[in-house]
Image: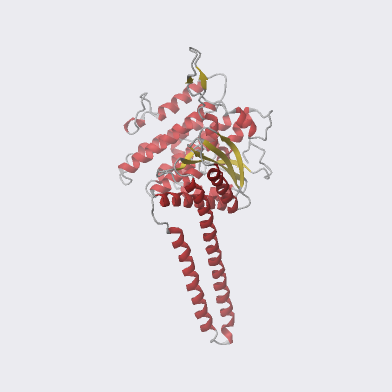
Amino acid sequence: MSNKSSSILPDSKQGDNIFDKYFTFIEKQKLNAIYVIDLSGLNQSVTIIERNLVDLSQNKEAGKERIEQLNDNIQYLLNEWYLPLSMFSNNQLFISSLAYNLFGLSLLINEINWTDENSLKTLLSFFAPSNNYNKLFYPSVIIKPNHNDDSTHFEMEEPEMNYATDYLIEARNHTVSWEFTEAREHLNFKLHHRKNLELFQITANDLISDHVDQLRRKTKELNLWETVHNYQLSLFDTAQAEWTIKIQTDQDDPDAVNFFELLHHFTLALKLIDDEIEIKLEDWGNGSKWALLKVTIKSFFIREDVKSILTKAFDSVDAQLVRKPIAEADKTEAEAERILRETANLKTRQQAHESEELDLQLKRINVVKGALEAEDQMLNNRLKAIHVANQLSEMIKNGMVKNDGALSIEINGLLAYQSGELIQTKMDEIANRESIQPKLSTPDASSTEQGL
């Protein structure tokens, strides 16, 4: 067990930091004779994270405040992963895949000197658990009658871990015979997909066999931001993203027309982004009225459009309700129109000048003309895209404003909008909590062992 962290890592209330928690878990698992699970990769990854944080504490260039903030964020992510680790402790595929993911997280610590704060948060969220783990561990509160008297008093039981077997069965098209082990492999596709692609320039075997210092040297020059970006661009060749969106009003009896209009506008706006977006009503409930949507996204660029339109809608609602002018979208559209006009004028002047030249210049005229026409078309397309995006954001905004006062929207398990509150979570962080699942059309989609 490592003891280097005590100088920089704050103790928990129990006196053990998160690294002690992981190393103790690993030691206990090694003593368990029932299951033979190789935990060496996990031990390596956690050790490298700890050592990198120790090195970071000596980094005067980064600044004390940034170092402390990154340190806290890393420990927060490790805490988030600990519950799934505890549940899947006897599943070798999960352990190996998580170890590889945490190795990638260790590389993030080296980015602090040349990466801005927002980019660091986006990278951090890339290594966070997916929202589908929430369905496994969401605490269920049970209310039951108190039989000690004849009154109608109710008491609440302590929340317990929910293994969500029903959810896992449902996720496989109601195949009741689907075993829980297979469910876990399907659930962790996002993790072992990264491992099988050798995303961080080492193999899973390297993580087990190489010395810690050797692993650190191998990946010292890796550009993590570029690696993650390229991965996300190519991910949708074989996989698709699944978002959960929970729209809720705390009103017991909300206006039915307004609430259903919000659901209609919200889902219609998303669907109008692209026909390939699939939207299903997963569940709904009473008490506070809520609806749970599952949105399937099959393209990186569609995903970016969804992020952009939702961000604009939420920002517009916030701005309108506090009576701030909304001008950003209009300025963008006006700027695009201005560029289009100037380009058109440039084209006219250029053509007039070229027309006076000799026949020898005719080919060059045609080339210039073709390039300018192509530029005009690109600007026209961009202008149309801006206009459509503004309309879709406005559609969502209008539905939200009519339900304001007790409205909240959770996306991928994180709060994205709350009436009267300024939400700090960025859409990039929310998007990275998405569930990644194999596309059924790909040849190896059914192979959970290979993860492709």
Residue 444 lies, with reference to residue 345, above or below; the image says above
Task: Report x, y in % for residue 137.
Answer: 52, 29
Q: Is residue 209 shown to the viewer in this render?
A: no
Residue 401 lies, with reference to residue 106, above or below; the image says below
Residue lying at 56% horizontally and 64% vertically, measured from the top left: 381
Task: Report x, y in % for residue 299.
Answer: 59, 50
Coloring basis for residues: secondary structure
Q: Is residue 90 shown to the viewer in this render?
A: yes
In the foreground, 300 or 196: 300
Task: Report x, y in % for residue 373.
Answer: 57, 72
Image quadrant containing the N terminus: top left
Q: Quadrant of residue 448?
A: top right
Task: Report x, y in % for residue 271.
Answer: 60, 50
How many marks the image carries: the answer is 0
- Would residue 117 be found to the left or right of residue 304 on screen? left
Q: Quadrant of residue 284?
A: top right
Residue 236 lies, with reference to residue 146, above or below; the image says below
Image quadrant containing the C terminus: top right
